[in-house]
Image (cartoon, rainbow, N blue to C red):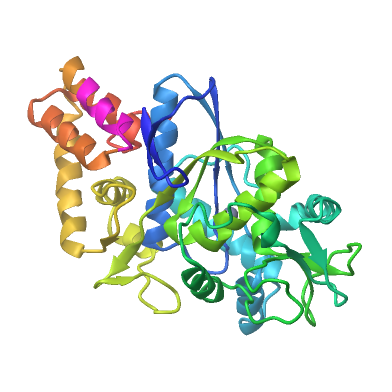
Amino acid sequence: MQLFDTRSGDLRPLITGHTVRLYVCGITPYDAAHLGHASTYVMFDVLIRLLEHRGHRVRYVRNVTDVDDDILRTARERDVDYRTLAERETAAFDRDLRALGCRAPDVAPRATETVPAIVTAVGGLLARGSAYALDDGRVYFDIASAHDFGRLSRLDRDRMLEQFAEKGGDPEASGKRDELDFLLWQPSGDGEPRWPSPWGDGRPGWHIECSVMAMEHLGGVIDIHGGGSDLVFPHHEAEIAQSEHLTGQGPFARFWLHTGMVGLDGEKMSKSVGNLVFARDLLDRFEGATIRAYVLAHHYRETWSHSDDDLQAACDRVKRWRAAATGDGSDATMEQTLLRCLDNDLDTPRALAALDRLADEGHGESVRRMATVLGLDLGNDLTA
Ligand SMILES: [Zn+2]
């Protein structure tokens, strides 16, 4: 099986032990899951199912970023405790993903439960000289100590600065050695949750949370780290820098997998643009298998746009597969063809075309077996 590794920039064979350690960045639970989230987690669910079909055991960790600026702001706006908001949105997210046929992760660590370990990690980075503390309680990672900062994203400094500012960074903040140095620890604002630390009561920066949760549950070197491509910079770039400094070994992740963005009318779907298509709204109109088939008709690295026509086509397709799945015939060669498509960097569009052929030729048993690998509920056993 080969996958496209963002860090090396090419397709590489995935060679792992029996257990594959997978970390996928989870959601920040302050709003409902949109189609972009759904698409990312469906793609990783297919990867997990394929690896298991190939005989591996997958240890899947997906975190919940349950304390950050967005949650705290939204909680304030809605006059609700941030923990209540996070709890409610996490439950809704889990419900939506279940409806899409996605398995729950083995561990779903929450940032708020990980703070003591994060404090230890920040202390470790300071002791190694790769971080510095300011008098006001902020602690920054010193990117001058990371020899290959920028290797994952391949962005020049101007683009890095642009994205850093866009995605919650603080390039202009006073006292920093480099504008791109990122927060590891910060003092909490009025009314914000706070935890004790040697640098004063405060809360962690976003990036260090994922590094610590990944290392706590998967060890210092993980096989596959994934997420949406909007997380490449600065989030994943920062994770690499701080994790490899903490463990003193590399690589932190042997493969970096990133899913393309989903747009609407040619624009990236985002809360700030206000053009979100929520998974829940689609699930009110279509069954989970239809939305899943709709997502899988795109390659995971592709950037694509939501289209009601394509969704309707997926609905018709699922009906054909379901009708065929009641039959008995099988075609081992075509099943192998389908699996080889998935082995080739998860080529789901081609795999679905192979499923079409199996259905058209009346190989019901094969349709059921392959639908299980793809996580499509056609009346087959999805837990197989
Ligand atoms: Zn993350």
Instruction: Name the residue located 35 percent from the left edge and 68 percent from the top edge.
Output: 277
User: Does residue 330 appear anywhere in the picture?
Assistant: no
Displayed-image quarter of ligand 1: bottom right
Where 278 sits versus 378, above or below?
A: below
Q: Horizontal and vertical percent for residue 282?
A: 32, 61
Residue 337 is a magenta residue:
yes
Q: Horizontal and vertical percent for residue 83?
A: 70, 66
Q: Is 294 left, or right, of 115 in this rendering?
A: left
Magenta span: 336-346
User: Does residue 193 appear anywhere in the picture?
Assistant: yes
Q: Is 289 left, or right, of 182 in this rendering?
A: left
Q: Horizontal and vertical percent for residue 85?
A: 63, 68
Instruction: Name the residue located 29 percent from the left edge and 24 percent from the top edge.
Output: 369
Q: Horizontal and vertical percent for residue 248?
A: 73, 40
Quadrant that contains the N terminus: top left
Q: Is 274 left, or right, of 19 in this rendering?
A: left
Q: Where, by quadrant of the figure, is residue 260 drawn? A: bottom left
Where 92 sits versus 269, above or below?
A: above
User: Magenta region's main secondary structure?
Assistant: helix
